[in-house]
Image (cartoon, grey):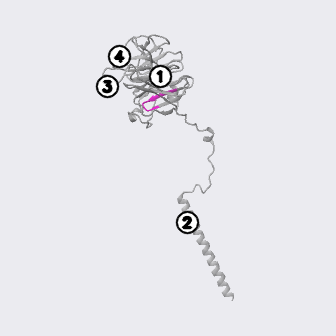
């Protein structure tokens, strides 16, 4: 679509598409001045940037509610094993930026067991409920246990509601089979009828009924679209018309927004065909090679017997003729 080349906008981890362009967020950038909410035009040129009122630790995804409010998922928490710092956070946060607001508002959250997790995926249910899917451990799904509270030090507890299970699809990506298992982003279509979760390798799209995104992910069968060889593919969103995916890579240099046409849903088998009786087969079509061999041998033996009977008959006739003479 276009290339983001502004030096302020690097390590893009979350994105939404608007009618006029794109909104993106940087993740845990070493330069804290670059951790902002960036508004780009349709050519990926920076239009404006909105800073956070306090330090945002690791923004990883971005979603837009039906009223135009932007929700930034400050939910990343890389462990030392994943190359992160030795200190892990006790709370995560969602920042809300209302339309035309100059500053976002923080809403803190805590995991139910108090243990830190690394997450990079935020989706919004039809009623606006935020849904978080973890990267480490992979695929755990959480929602707030009660309404969000703004600007409180104690986080609202999260409740685990299911698990997303990515597959080893074999799609080429920088992390091979590991990349296919790591959840890095998600989005809901503008009309709310579809939801997508991505890994470093693929996009999994689900059909949503009645705004229940969790049920779609935990009980539905996804259509998988390959996202091959993206350098570090983390962002995914729908185009404003909902017909395509847009993705972007998290890398400390210029990055390109890519467009994908979602794979078509797998055709459903007609119910009638499942209940229909099996087609009639001739007795010959059911014979094995051994059966046919024995059949040929039997026919051959029967033919020899017939020849023998004929020979005996001829001999009897000749003997009878000689006796009569």
Residue bearing mark 2: 297
Sequence-wise first label, 2 or 3: 3
In the image, farthest residue toward the bottom: 325
Q: Is mark 4 on a helix, strand or loop?
A: helix
Where is residue 137 drawn, in percent x and y?
Answer: 39, 27
Q: Which residue is drawn at 62% across and 75% down?
A: 309
Sequence-wise first label, 4 or 3: 4
Q: Observer-nearest residue: 187 or 41?
A: 41
Q: Measure the alpha-carbon separation of dots 4 and 2.
A: 87 Å
Q: Measure the alpha-carbon separation of dots 3 and 1.
A: 37 Å
Magenta residues (range) = 195-202
Q: Measure the alpha-carbon separation of dots 1 and 2.
A: 79 Å
Sequence-wise first label, 1 or 4: 4
Frontmost of labels 1 and 2 is 1
Residue bearing mark 1: 43
Q: Observer-nearest residue: 266 or 288?
A: 266
Queried whether the magenta region covers residue 197, the answer comes back as yes
Residue 32, disc? 4
Q: Measure the alpha-carbon separation of dots 1 and 4.
A: 25 Å
Where is residue 142 drawn, in percent x and y?
Answer: 45, 22
What is the crowding at mark 2: few (fewer than 14 residues within 10 Å), some, or many (at least 20)? few
Residue 80, disc? 3
Q: From the viewer's perspective, is 307 left or right of 197?
A: right
Pointers 1 and 2 in contact (C-beta within 8 Å):
no
Q: What element carries label 1?
A: loop
Q: What element carries label 2?
A: helix
């Amino acid at each position: 679509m276009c290339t983001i080349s502004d030096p302020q906008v690097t390590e893009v981890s979350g994105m939404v598409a608007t009618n006029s362009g794109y909104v993106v967020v940087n993740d845990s950038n070493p330069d804290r001045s670059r951790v902002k909410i960036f508004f780009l035009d349709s050519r990926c040129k920076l239009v404006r940037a909105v800073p956070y009122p306090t330090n945002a630790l690791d923004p990883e995804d971005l979603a837009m509610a039906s009223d135009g409010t932007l929700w930034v998922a400050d939910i990343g928490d890389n462990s030392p094993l994943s190359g992160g710092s030795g200190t892990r956070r006790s709370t995560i946060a969602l920042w809300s930026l209302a339309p035309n607001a100059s500053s976002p508002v923080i809403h803190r959250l805590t995991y139910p067991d108090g243990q830190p997790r690394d997450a990079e995926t935020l989706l919004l249910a039809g009623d606006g409920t935020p849904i978080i899917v973890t990267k480490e451990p992979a695929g755990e799904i959480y929602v707030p246990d009660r309404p969000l509270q703004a600007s409180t030090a104690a986080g609202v507890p999260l409740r685990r509601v299911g698990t997303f299970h990515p597959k080893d699809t074999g799609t080429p990506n920088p992390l091979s089979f590991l990349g296919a298992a790591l959840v890095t982003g998600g989005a809901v279509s503008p009309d709310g009828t579809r939801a997508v979760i991505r890994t470093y390798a693929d996009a999994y799209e689900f059909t949503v009924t009645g705004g229940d995104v969790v049920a779609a992910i935990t009980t539905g069968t996804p259509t998988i679209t390959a996202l091959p060889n993206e350098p570090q593919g983390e962002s995914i969103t729908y185009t404003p018309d909902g017909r395509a995916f847009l993705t972007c890579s998290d890398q400390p240099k210029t990055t390109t927004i890519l467009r994908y046409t979602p794979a078509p849903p797998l055709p459903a088998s007609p119910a009638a065909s499942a209940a229909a009786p099996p087609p009639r087969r001739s007795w010959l079509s059911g014979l094995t090679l051994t059966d046919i061999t024995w059949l040929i041998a039997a026919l051959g033996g029967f033919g020899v017997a017939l020849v023998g009977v004929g020979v005996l008959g001829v001999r009897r006739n000749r003997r009878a003729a000689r006796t009569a003479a």
